[in-house]
Amino acid sequence: MPVDCQVATRGRCGSRGGGQRARGLGWAPFLERARREEKRAEGRRRCGGPASPGGSLSSGQRGRPGTVAAARMAACAEAPELVYLVTGGCGFLGEHVVRMLLEQEPRLRELRVFDLRLSPWLEELKTGPVQVTAIQGDVTQAHEVAAAVSGAHVVIHTAGVVDVFGRVSPETIYKVNVQGTQNVIEACVQMGTRFLVHTSSMEVVGPNIKGQPFHRGDEDTPYEAVHKHPYPQSKAQAERLVLEANGREVRGGLTLVTCALRPTGIYGEGHQIMRDFYRQGLRLGGRLFRAVPASVEHGRVYVGNVAWMHVLVARELEQRAALMGGQVYFCYDQSPYKSYEDFNMEFLGPCGLRLVGTRPLLPHWLLVLLTALNTLLQWLLRPLVLYAPLLNPYTLAMANTTFTVSTNKAQRHFGYKPLFSWEVSRARTILWLQGKEGSAQ
Ligand SMILES: NC(=O)c1ccc[n+]([C@@H]2O[C@H](COP(=O)([O-])OP(=O)(O)OC[C@H]3O[C@@H](n4cnc5c(N)ncnc54)[C@H](O)[C@@H]3O)[C@@H](O)[C@H]2O)c1
Ligand SMILES: CC(C)CCC[C@@H](C)[C@H]1CC[C@H]2[C@@H]3[C@H](O)C=C4C[C@@H](O)CC[C@]4(C)[C@H]3CC[C@]12C
């Protein structure tokens, strides 16, 4: 249920600037409510009033950074005001999607952020021109999802359990990732919400259990997608549900338009595994030891670009429903193709760490033995303590198997171009790692 709801004092049709990051919530509630009502009325006068969820989205602003104010003005002149729901909006990716929407979607009236655990940074967003509604809820609870979806024009479903370390039971992974996604679909159908963007994963494709390489493949590259691990299995099942739901009739008689995005390994501000490697390196006296060959390429993509792609897809889904509905898109940008460890060193190096060895220090068979030992320990210790190291048979196979994408499908279908260059993505990630800057906690 909505636990809070706030509209800021600036007109929704006015310039946005960087105002979303402003702090300070010291207004008296009644004064704020009055201003809110006044602004709403003004917005309605200037923008022609809100539309129903089943109504038209009226596309148009294929916004690039810096054009938001103009786009907002233009949007207000003709478009309805939109309500977006982001599930998992307090997660690593979710936070970036939320911030990106506030910066880059000029037609936004209300942004609902739905998550199991709400983050404190949501507070600062409530001082901007868009109504940010924080909803503490669980995607496995159909009624909670339905209540959150009710009245939304677009749902961006990023919520999920991301676990390849054995921290979460397979049952929970399935319940959240598959049943949760089904609940989101059913809520859209019941509530008449037409546009659903789902965060899938490259792991829906691979690496597969045979460890076959996928070298700069695209969405049509043939690959034997066979999984045993609960996480990729659940993501594959969820993606299938989303794609199959495309074209279903929603309340009001219109059809549901769905789309799935498949990021490769995401990095950027808020990436906890990167931080874990950083801390581990510091503990080891500023060194990390190479474990996988430098020749293995592992696909990575900057979180800001993944968020940007979500925002663009959501924006373009209506106008290009016939083309984009039921489609999958890999998330890509200009991040270089490198091994998992060499890529991490792009950030950890400038933070003072060193990767020791030009070749893996331990022979592969020993690493495999270590992963087996970790699996055994995890099982033995389970009744007493959760032992979930980074290295297990699955993560070793992932790091050891070339899996990179090279595609321009998103560009062809909806004009996607990365918003952040590799240099900027790298610099922002380094600053965050050093604790100097960055939105994600
Ligand atoms: N991190 C990656 O490298 C990566 C790569 C490809 C795809 N993805 C996908 O992107 C999405 C987001 O991943 P992330 O890395 O940001 O993970 P994350 O764990 O940081 O974020 C997931 C969010 O979902 C929320 N959530 C979990 N269970 C929930 C429930 N039952 N109800 C409501 N909210 C719930 C969590 O509280 C969290 O805020 C996931 O669907 C994941 O499969 C991630
Ligand atoms: C040096 C290695 C042997 C140490 C182990 C690295 C391991 C923890 C890394 C390697 C690959 C990583 C995954 C990959 O980037 C892609 C995804 C897809 C996404 O949907 C969820 C995250 C995940 C699984 C990364 C998790 C961490 C992995 C396994």
Image (cartoon, rainbow, N blue to C red):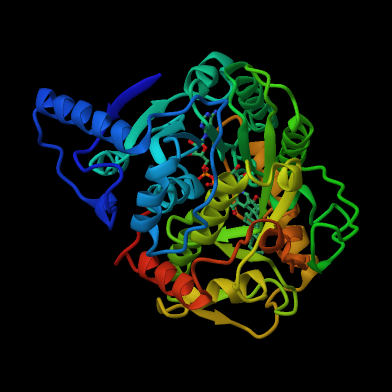
> Observer-nearest residue: 411 or 5?
411
Q: For residue 140, which quarter of the picture?
A: top right
> Observer-nearest residue: 300 or 375?
300
> Observer-nearest residue: 239 or 292?
239
Where does residue 381 sit, x and y in percent of width and height? Answer: 61, 37
For the point 74% across and 66% down, the residue is 407
Q: Is residue 101 left or right of residue 388?
A: left
Residue 287 visible: no
The vertical placement of 245 against 417, above or below, is above
The vertical placement of 103 against 89, above or below, is below
The vertical placement of 395 against 172, above or below, is below
Q: Is residue 5 left or right of residue 277?
A: left
In this view, the residue farthest toward the top is: 143
Name the quarter showing ligand 1: top right
Locate the N terminus and report the quarter of the image it occupies: top left
> Observer-nearest residue: 325 or 179?
325
In this view, the residue farthest toward the bottom is: 358
For the point 78% across and 36% down, the residue is 240
Q: Is residue 210 left or right of residue 149?
A: right
The vertical placement of 409 against 106, above or below, is below
Where does residue 223 sit, x and y in percent of width and height? Answer: 89, 57
Tally the numbered discs.
0
Residue 192 visible: yes
For the point 71% across and 62% down, the residue is 412
For the point 48% across and 62% down, the residue is 268
Where does residue 379 sit, x and y in percent of width and height? Answer: 68, 38
Q: For residue 289, which quarter of the picture?
A: bottom right
Where does residue 327 sit, x and y in percent of width and height? Answer: 75, 46
